[in-house]
Image (cartoon, grey):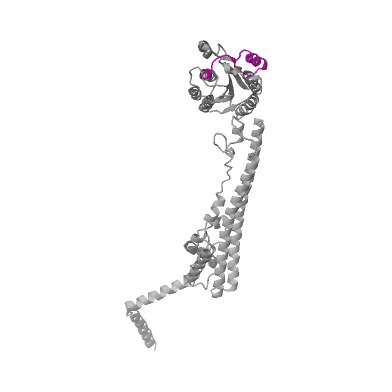
Amino acid sequence: MKILRSLACLCFLLTACQSDSSSTPEEQEQEQTTNTQAESSSNEAQTAEAISFEKDGEAFIHNEAGEMYKSYVPESESADQDDSEQATELAISDYIEEVQTKDTEEWTAEQWATSLLNGLRANYDQAFSPVQDFKVTYESLKLPDGRLLQDVTEEELNNRPDKVNVAMLIDSSGSMKKEINSEKKMTAAKEAVQSFASELPEDVQASLYVFGHKGSEKEQDKDVSCKSIESVYPLSTYNNDTFTDSMDSFSAKGWTPLAGAIQQATSDLKENSTDETKNFIYIVSDGKETCGGNPVEAAKGATNQGMDVEVHIIGFQVDTEANQQLKEVAEAGGGAYTSVDNPQQLDEEVMKSWKETISKTTWRFWSAGNHNNLNWDSVGMSTDLRNLYANFQSVKDQEFWRINNTLDRLLEKEIITFEQKGEIQDLLKKRKEAITEYTSAIYDEKDKEIFDEADRLKEMIDKITEDLDL
């Protein structure tokens, strides 16, 4: 009996082996395909790999846009409402059609949320970057050298040159003897210049030059007059008595050697300058060059001496030809030109324009309207920033509606349950809150920066205005 039982087992084994070895190639291929499909089916639920919804908002912001979003939505975001709704409908339909090809029966809420985001997520990086990269720039507040006031540190603003030299030149040609409103032009010029000199800061070095104060307006005295260029108050700190004596030492008489006077003042300033010295040449004249010189070239030469210098001129009741020449001279010397018609205007211009240029920073600023300009600029920037953030919020709201609409349809088709929908929404809500917290903090900080910078610039303007005594 035992032998018979052993023989039966052996026959069974041989039969099984023969059956395996005798299967055809077609049968073997079919069997392999069946096994592959079974493995695929078992892994189907893992096709939407779960992500962590505990990330912060910054991590969510930098996720790529969803595949359906990229395919349909971007081109329509700035389109009209009908086009936008049509694109959204296409994206949702495409997602549902694709997800129905998968075995989602075992998917968790995390996998569903991930799948929805991978398909329909908005491009937050692109939508939020205009807010994140927003530059707080007050472009209307520029210094004369072209720099923005906000780009200058207070240290730079308050930093004055190590040394400031001022050369004042008074035209003493014969025409300065003429009277305007019962006052001689020469008297008015002297009074205006001395008032200016008396208010110079204590550490400013001042000098006074007179030209054309010898000879007469006659042709035979031209040579003497054209050579009459004199430093009646050598470069030094201002002393009222000495300066007054210097003013009393000359009167209006002859011709106008303007070019020579500029050259003489330039030479003296050069000898008394270092790389850190700021030099000013101030001129009051009532006419053009009459001694054959080229004052425009003389002014250009002053600026080419390797020193920091500006040539400013006031034309005192000048004709059209003289007005044009004096203007060109000032421009060549890197300074400003102004024309006045009477003693009162001369005094006002000397005290306003010249005093402003000799200010602490040697920059010219305006005082009226700066605060108003800042207020308008800050409000305008804040509005621009708010609009950019509103655009981002709109993209976020559209995404929220798009995904929730998709969940409703999945529920209608019984692809997900009501309970699953709630769990998925909870996860998506957690993500939305993280994004809102992150983006709103950046928006608030940017908006605060706008008004903080405005306040800082207001303080700088107030200080500048105070220093310039405008």
Residue 45 rendering spot, x and y as whole percentages: 50, 70
Towards the viewer: 360 or 126: 360
Magenta segment: 232-261
The structure residue drawn at horizontal position 59% and vertical position 33%, both measured from the top left corner, is: 156
To which quarter of the image does residue 375 belong? top right
The structure residue drawn at horizontal position 65% and vertical position 42%, both measured from the top left corner, is: 372
Residue 338 rendering spot, x and y as whole percentages: 58, 28
Towards the viewer: 384 or 434: 384
Q: Position of 449 compared to 11: left or right? A: right
Q: Position of 431 compared to 36: left or right? A: right
Towards the viewer: 356 or 340: 340
Whether 138 is drawn above or below 303: the answer is below
Q: Is residue 244 magenta?
A: yes
To which quarter of the image does residue 164 belong? top right
To which quarter of the image does residue 22 belong? bottom left
The structure residue drawn at horizontal position 66% and vertical position 15%, both measured from the top left corner, is: 244
Figure quadrant of the C terminus: top right
Figure quadrant of the N terminus: bottom left
Residue 47 rendering spot, x and y as whole percentages: 48, 67
Q: Is residue 49 shown to the viewer in this render? A: no
Whether 372 is drawn above or below 163: the answer is below
Towards the viewer: 244 or 441: 244
Q: Is residue 241 magenta?
A: yes
